[in-house]
């Protein structure tokens, strides 16, 4: 571990001490340490569920005609999540909210690990599995109930207990608008410290959000982030490190979490 990382951790801890309005924008990299792979890599979920055309699976018209291919993916995803826990970093940001410092988590992830870590104000801009809705009557099912219905009999599509309509997790499909864009823009504009963690900043509109910040920006990402939407000159601290390793060093200064 280089002293540069130690210095960056001390600086980051100082930024947190000085801040009153912290916001986190998280991406897929925050969840890789939990064991969630990318979607398209050799061990990715699309590959595992033999999905060749994801744009056809996450398409509302296709789903309404035949939800079976989507559910092939979704069952794999739910079974995997069941075995996983939120990461150290997920818990750290939940603890920062409990301290009153962090005002919101904006996430591109659909895994709902922020909720499971105890975060309260979470804007899942690409939706997530935390809520599921009936396509017929709109009835809402929570994560536990929807998982139970989805995995009960894998030869059947889960349906609404009230009207028999097909259930659809609240994931944003291709062509659907992202969620909570106004709220996300507002909290970022009001932030005095924005964390961008585990995102390559290539997927819009999420990638366009950090540049709205007027306060400090800390980026924690293994590898570069795209400079197109967030110019490097806007970043106060860029940490090219594994997220949990770095957050553990930061927490040595703040003591928010037990090890
Ligand atoms: P991305 O474009 O895949 O970028 C992730 C970044 O995280 C990359 O630059 C990686 O190098 C970096 N990274 C990975 N692991 C670590 C780690 N342990 N420590 C530090 N850095 C790490 O992901 P984005 O979120 O920016 O955008 C991609 C799409 C795919 C978004 O819509 C994601 O929500 C979606 N996705 C979601 C999940 C999930 O819900 N967990 C998983 C895979 C993809
Ligand atoms: Zn219904």
Image (spheres, rainbow, N blue to C red):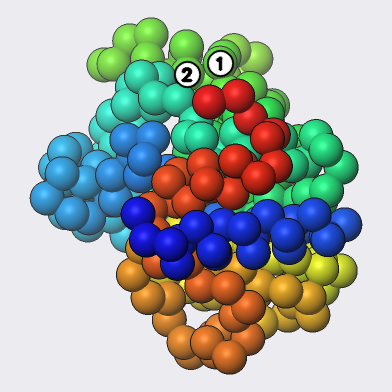
Mark 2 crowd level (few <14, some 14–19, many ≥20, 10 Å Cα): many
Depth check: 219 or 180 in front?
Answer: 219
Identify which residue is drawn at 34% across, 70% down: 223
* Number of the label disc, if any, that sits on residue 147: 2
Q: Is residue 155 left or right of residue 220?
A: left
Question: Could you say which quadrant of the image residue 221 lies in?
Answer: bottom left
* Number of the label disc, if any, that sits on residue 144: 1
Q: Find numbered disc 1 in the image and state the secondary structure of the residue it sits on.
A: helix
| Horizontal and vertical percent position of residue 69 | 27, 39
| Horizontal and vertical percent position of residue 104 | 76, 51
Question: Could you say which quadrant of the image residue 192 lies in?
Answer: bottom right
* Number of the label disc, if any, that sits on residue 168: none
Determine if the C-beta at disc 1 is less than 8 A from ligand 2. no
Q: Is residue 146 left or right of residue 181?
A: left
Determine if the C-beta at disc 2 is less than 8 A from ligand 1. no
Task: For residue 135, say whether it is visible.
Answer: no
Seen in the picture, residue 232 relative to 168 is either above or below; the reply is: below
| Horizontal and vertical percent position of residue 108 | 53, 56
Seen in the picture, residue 42 relative to 2 is either above or below; the reply is: above
Identify which residue is drawn at 83% across, 61% down: 18
Identify which residue is drawn at 54% across, 63% down: 7
**As drawn, which residue projects farthest toward the top?**
152
Q: Is residue 75 left or right of residue 88?
A: left
Question: Could you say which quadrant of the image residue 31 lies in?
Answer: top left
Q: Find numbered disc 2 in the image and state the secondary structure of the residue it sits on.
A: helix
Q: On the rendered image, what quadrant is the N terminus found in?
A: bottom left
Depth check: 238 or 122 in front?
Answer: 238
Q: Is residue 41 left or right of residue 115?
A: left
Seen in the picture, residue 112 relative to 124 is either above or below; the reply is: above
Task: For residue 243, say whether it is visible.
Answer: yes
Identify which residue is drawn at 69% across, 34% down: 256
**Total residue callouts:** 2
């Amino acid at each position: 571990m280089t002293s540069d990382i130690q210095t960056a951790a001390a600086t980051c801890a100082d930024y947190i001490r000085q801040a009153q309005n912290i916001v986190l924008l998280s991406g897929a990299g925050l969840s890789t340490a939990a064991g969630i792979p990318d979607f398209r890599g050799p061990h990715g979920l699309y590959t595992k569920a033999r999905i060749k055309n994801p744009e056809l699976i996450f398409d509302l018209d296709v789903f309404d005609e035949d939800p079976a291919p989507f559910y092939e993916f979704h069952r794999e995803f739910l079974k995997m999540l069941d075995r996983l826990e939120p990461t150290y970093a997920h818990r750290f940001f939940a603890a920062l909210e409990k301290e009153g410092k962090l005002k919101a988590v904006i996430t591109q992830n659909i895994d709902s690990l922020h909720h499971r870590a105890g975060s309260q104000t979470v804007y899942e801009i690409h939706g997530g599995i935390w809520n599921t809705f009936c396509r017929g009557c709109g009835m809402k099912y929570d994560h536990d109930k929807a998982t139970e219905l989805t995995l009960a009999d894998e030869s059947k599509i889960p349906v609404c207990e009230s009207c028999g309509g097909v259930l659809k997790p609240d994931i944003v499909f291709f062509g659907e608008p992202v969620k909570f864009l106004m709220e996300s823009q507002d909290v970022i504009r009001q932030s005095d410290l924005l964390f961008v963690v585990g995102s390559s900043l290539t997927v819009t509109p999420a990638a366009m959000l950090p540049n709205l910040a007027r306060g400090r920006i800390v980026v924690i990402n293994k590898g570069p982030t795209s400079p197109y939407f967030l110019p490097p000159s806007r970043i106060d601290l860029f940490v090219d490190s594994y997220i949990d390793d770095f957050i553990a060093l930061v927490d040595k200064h703040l003591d928010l979490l037990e090890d």
